[in-house]
Image (spheres, rainbow, N blue to C red):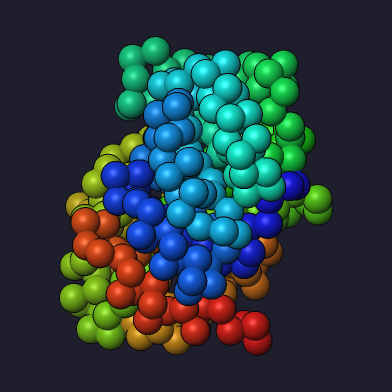
Amino acid sequence: MTANLGRIGIWRWVDGLNADLAAEVERLGYGTIWIGGSPPADLGIVDTLLDATENITVATGIVNMWSDDAASVARSYHRIVARHPGRFLLGVGVGHPEATREYCKPYDTIVSYLDELDAAGVPVGDRALAALGPNVLALAAERTAVAHPYLTTPEHTRWAREILGDGVLLAPEQKVVLDTDAARARRTARPAVATPYLSLTNYVGNLRRLGWSDDEIADGGSDRLIDALVAHGDAEAVARGVAAHLDAGADHVCVQALPPDADPLPVYRALADALHDPSR
């Protein structure tokens, strides 16, 4: 692939990203900024973040295939890489069925969208695909440079690596709460997990595939499920939770600081040394 993701990046909703945050995240040593929340096809926020930084990679996590057509997204891709070669990863995905009435045959839609990106000259090496289940993970290995699972555990990462094999990067998202009070950390984490993900069929189906029972998924998620999906504690404990994905076969982990409506920079500053420790 063209872009260098580094080992650790950050994941942030598109509305919470700006030039100042990007510059500080780069200064702290993070390798990639992942733009969440289905950024629109013009990808203007990508220009903003790249213009404010010198070396960090920017990735979309993800452009929603149902919302934005491949031709428009491809035009934005070419505009961006012409100005910032080697620093942009186009992440795309099919989203979830609750998001659109037109949602049908998601696998066929993904294949068709990737075909259109091929035709528009978006190279495989600059593409990532949101992938949870075995079929889409296998497709990511065949048609993109990066598989990007969201709301997963290290157990999923280990399983995903077996499906992907070698040659494609695995870049899961990991939610974190920097708080040594476990009960309070769960109170912070649970809303960001439960709403909307524990009511969406693709995420619930993935958790069931990993062995989680309906009782543990219900009512906002059991404490055990929240602990599995959100790393919490002091900086060292959070770093161990992130490193568990790397140990399980991930090449890169993008860290989402919770709560999502708070300034994430204090968390990213506090975690920087522990997360970037090369001995992990």
Q: How many marks?
A: 0
**Closest to the observer, 259 or 88:** 88
Residue 239 is situated, as x and y percent measured from the top left of the image, at 48, 79
Residue 262 is situated, as x and y percent measured from the top left of the image, at 22, 62
Residue 213 is situated, as x and y percent measured from the top left of the image, at 38, 53
**Closest to the observer, 222 or 2:** 2
Q: Residue furthest top?
A: 102
The picture quadrant where one finds residue 216 is bottom left
Q: Residue at x 58, y 30 (%)?
A: 79
Residue 192 is situated, as x and y percent measured from the top left of the image, at 27, 54
The picture quadrant where one finds residue 56 is bottom right
Examine the rendering and report whether any part of residue 149 can be seen.
Answer: no
Q: Residue at x 65, y 54 (%)?
A: 170
Asked if residue 241 lies left or right of residue 116, the reply is: left
* In the rendered image, the vertical position of residue 42 relative to residue 4, given as above or below: above
Asked if residue 19 lies left or right of residue 57, the reply is: left
Q: Residue at x 45, y 27 (%)?
A: 42
Q: Quadrant of the C terminus?
A: bottom right
The picture quadrant where one finds residue 15 is top left
Q: Residue at x 48, y 41 (%)?
A: 47
